[in-house]
Every structure is written in structure tokens, then in C-alpha cells.
Image: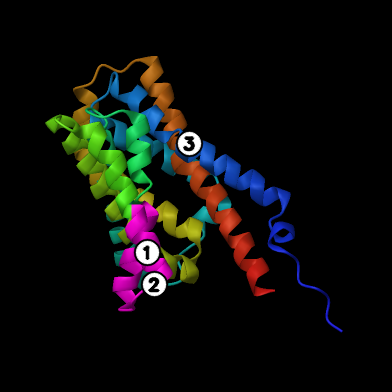
Amino acid sequence: MTAPQPSHRQAFAPMDWALLTAVALMWGSSFLLIDIGLDHLEPAAVEWLRLVFGGATLACIPAARRPLIRRAEWPLVALLGLVWMAVPFLLFAIAQQSIASSLAGMINGAAPLFTAAIAAAWSRSIPARWQLAGLVIGFAGVLLINGPATLGAPASALGAGLILLAALFYGIAFNLAVPLEKRSGALPVIWRAQLVAIVLVAPPGVVGLAGSTPAWSSLLAMLALGALSTGLGFAAFTTWLAASERRAGQ
């Protein structure tokens, strides 16, 4: 006689709740930290400092420094750094010059919807009816949130559109990251993608930093944004994901 399978509640251990709560707090606060950074820094400087502090934090984690399985992965890792970090992070900083951080966070909630839609298109499979209905309802909800907040305000509409574009890039990145991370591990891939992004945005980042008037409040916000949201946040999420996949395979 086989032992009874654990329920979903039992399978979700206290450590899972702790990791997900930490990730939610770190990623959820990122839009507020961007707002604080923009008080004294140019958007490109906000993005670059975020990546620099995030990459430095991940470098302190031995698992992130493990080599990639194959050198041939580097072009895809570089592409991941472009679509997951270099482009979206700059779009967030530019957009939040004209919209509130709370609205930016809500619109960014469309990222999982784009991820699912792109995954279906990538695999050339039609989602089940209930999945398709969920996507339609989700996108409708994003439009309902976005519409009233930007009605009659061209700058706000542009900002909201940039956040939606960043969420679209996230959807592409998540689908690109999965096979890479399965082959070489999540943290090694994410850290190297961040290193690529740091190099890509260094020129505008340095120019933006030179044109800024840094204050301690903005610099400390960037330290928290990089070290927590862009460094430890990724580490906590991938740790939780790996544990979940191990339990699913048992």
C-alpha cells in the first residue's frame, strides 16, 4: 500500500511561504524605490546603478558564479540580459517620471499574461477555453485599470504604455529563460545576464549619472533596489522554484 500523497497545503512548507513573502516584498517595493531614485537621478543612472548593485550582490553567492554548461549558451544569455533587464529596467524608470509607482506596479501585473500568451504562440498551441478566457479577462482588467488613470493625460498614457511594453519584454524573457536555466541553473544564467545588461547600459548610465545630482536618499534607494530587488530577490525566487521542482519530481 502506498503512502498518501501530501496535500497542496502540506506541500507548501513554511520555508516556501517565507521565500515567497520575501520576494513579494522585495519586488513589490521596487517601483517605490525607483520613484525615490528619480528624485535626484536620471532614468539611465537609476537603471545602471540598480544593475551594478544587483550584479555585485549576486556575485557574493557562490552558486551564481558556477560556469555555464556550454559556452554556446552565451548568445542566448546576452539576449536574455537585453530583454529581461537592459530594456525593461530603463522603460520602468522613464515611465515613472509621469505615472505613480502604484499604477506602474499594477500595470506590470500584465507580465504573467504576456508570458502565457507568448508561450502559447511559441509552442503553436491553442490554450484551453478556460485558459483563453482567463487571458482575455486578465488583459481586460489591465485596460480597466490603465484607462481611467490615463484618460486625458498624454504623458500618463505614454508612461502606462511603456510599462506595458516592459511587461511584454518580461513575457519574452520568462519564456527564453526557462530552457536556459534548466540547462545551466537559474542563478548562473541570471547573474551573467545581469553582467551583460550592465555592459550594455553603461554608456547611457554613466552619462545619466554625470547629469544627475545624487543625494543620499536616492543612492540608498538604488542600493536597496539593486541588492534586494535585483539581487537577493532573484536568489530567493530561484531557491523557492528549485525546491518546488524537486518536490514535484518526487
- Residue sitting at 34 percent across and 26 percent down? 35
Is 243 magenta? The answer is no
Label 2 sits on residue: 129
- Stretch in magenta: 111-138
Q: Secondary structure at mark 3?
A: helix
- Residue sitting at 26 percent across and 29 percent down? 99
Label 3 sits on residue: 227
Q: Is residue 176 left or right of residue 165?
A: right
Label 1 sits on residue: 133
Q: What is the C-alpha distance between the residues marked 1 and 2?
A: 6 Å
Q: Secondary structure at mark 2?
A: helix
The answer to the question of whether label 1 and label 3 lie on touching residues, with beta carbons closer than 8 A, is no
Q: Quadrant of residue 190?
A: bottom left
Question: Within 10 Å of the Cα at label 2, are there few (<14), some (14-19), or many (20+) other Cα atoms?
Answer: few
Q: Is residue 149 left or right of residue 101?
A: left
Compared to 130, does 158 lie above or below? above
Looking at the picture, how far across and down is residue 23, in whole percent? 54, 43
The answer to the question of whether label 1 and label 2 lie on touching residues, with beta carbons closer than 8 A, is yes
N-terminal label among 1 and 3? 1
Say which amino acid is labelled 3.
Answer: Ala
Q: What is the C-alpha distance between the residues marked 1 and 3?
A: 38 Å
Is 114 magenta? The answer is yes
Say which amino acid is labelled 1.
Answer: Ala
